[in-house]
Image (cartoon, helix red, strand yellow):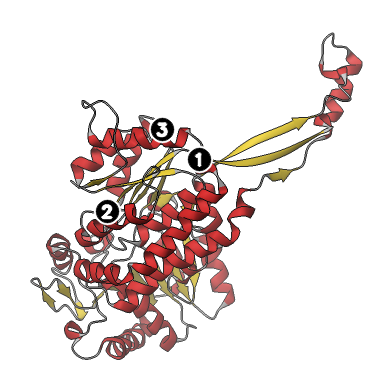
Amino acid sequence: MSVVSIPVSESQTASPIAVIVNDLRDSFSTGYTKDYGWRVEQLKKIIQMTEEQQDKIIAALKADLGKCKSESWTSEIGFIIGDAKHTLKYLKKWMKPRKVSTPVAAQPGKSYQLPEPLGTALIIGAWNYPFQLVFAPLIAAVAAGNCAVLKPSELAPEVSKLIADIVPQYLDSNAIAVVEGAVDETTELLNQQFDHIFYTGGEVVGKIVMRAASEHLTPVTLELGGKSPCIVENSADIDVTAARIVWSKWMNAGQTCVAPDYILVEKSMSSELIAAIQAKLKTFYGENIQANPDYGRIINGRHFDRLVSYLEDQNVIVGGEKDKESRFLSPTIVLDPDLQSPLMQQEIFGPILPVITLDSIKEAIPFVNKRPKPLALYVYTNDSNYEEKVLTQTSAGNTCVNDGFMFMVNPDLPFGGVGNSGMGNYHGKFGFDTFSHLKTVMKRSFKFDVSLRYPPFSTMKLAILKKLL
């Protein structure tokens, strides 16, 4: 375990992690993180850190995930810089009291909500976007005026080590700490009392996090995942659809929580769609995909073996090439898999794309609705009536029409799951609100203190009160 924290002053009998959390809570109690200037300084430091350390970030992402420079920039480095700049632009507005109307019975007076920080937050990142999924929640947490413990994923060791190294160089160590480690360290963190826990990962660990949080009645944000369906309706532009599916499915070698998990398409157009996807794969990655530096790698041997096992007894019609030593698994398409197989029961989280053919596209909505609510749902169509049906008759954390996960680039849209795919959301103002308590405030005047509400009561008083309330 590697721990970066503020100097400790707690009893030697306390665990190092407990000391870190207690010291951060002490820092928060002084109130200095509530200052607008402190929040701005930390956000600017995040930008400076990300810009100055980008070569090291790119190298770490390459080592852990085989990410190319362009993917590292667009999905991690540039994302964080843009998120922090957007937050800086609107922070003062978000911090202002939010006025609401005041009923006649409470006049003269005024009512408003006052955003205040929750306190000390725990942010547990994920390995698939190991830089972004630590610092995007941190941006929201410090914007709201909180202290935070960052727990990067141990499955991306180079990025985790880098985060532990650079955070104390740039950010306020009295308010922000990094704890590296695996199950033991995460368990010890979850034993501590936090004011909010933000977890990105899978459903199994999400339940563990929620159970631990319940011991302290700590609110949680769970960004999980699930099997995100991709419906291709008959009127869709096949060439553009194929390009966007390939981009969104095989970015980061398919290790994206909002990647299309499977395609639903009518049998009558399935061959055309598959051929178009094959053509785009060749255009994007060439004949020798394994030698292409733009195509990533599976995070580790365990996940490689898991993905390869999904292909057993399946109808692999595209790809399937593999090399365990380099953790390479080619873009793979499986046609009409057994719906009870692990491939269709588990979130794939890799470069395998099942294509499920239907007698009629009308079957797609019932197919989706029989399964747990996904983190994302995609529909490609030029039919506005069908689009409306999908939007109104299905439920998903996020939905995109005629593209992959482009909703991620809009900071004015919240990102989050529903049901098994998670709870709570963030990005932009929504992240600020997640890490804030919107305190209810009503201010009354001493003037015009009407006695209607005070005893002794009468029939007339009650009649007037009924009209006012």
Q: Amino acid at mark 3?
A: Asp
- CB atoms at circles 1 and 3 under 8 Å apart? no
Q: Amino acid at mark 1?
A: Tyr
Q: Residue 372: which quarter of the image?
A: bottom left
Label 3, label 2: how many angstroms apart (C-alpha)? 22 Å
Q: Mark 2 — residue?
A: 164
Q: Secondary structure at mark 2?
A: helix
Across and down, in percent, residue 271 comes to 32, 86
State the residue in front, 67 or 309.
67
State the residue in front, 363 or 130.
130
Q: Secondary structure at mark 3?
A: helix
Q: Residues within 10 Å of mark 1 (few under 14, many from 20)?
A: some
Q: Mark 3 — residue?
A: 26
Kindly identify the residue that appears in the image at 27 percent across and 62 percent down.
344
Kindly identify the residue that appears in the image at 51 percent across and 36 percent down.
31
Label 1, label 2: how many angstroms apart (C-alpha)? 24 Å
Tell me which label, 1 or 3, sits earlier in the chain. Answer: 3
Question: Is residue 413 visible in this depiction of the protein?
Answer: no
Task: Judge left or right: residue 45 versus residue 177.
Answer: right
Q: Amino acid at mark 2?
A: Ala
Tell me which label, 3 or 2, sits earlier in the chain. Answer: 3
Label number found at residue 119: none
- Where 439 sits versus 172, above or below? above
Q: Mark 1 — residue?
A: 32
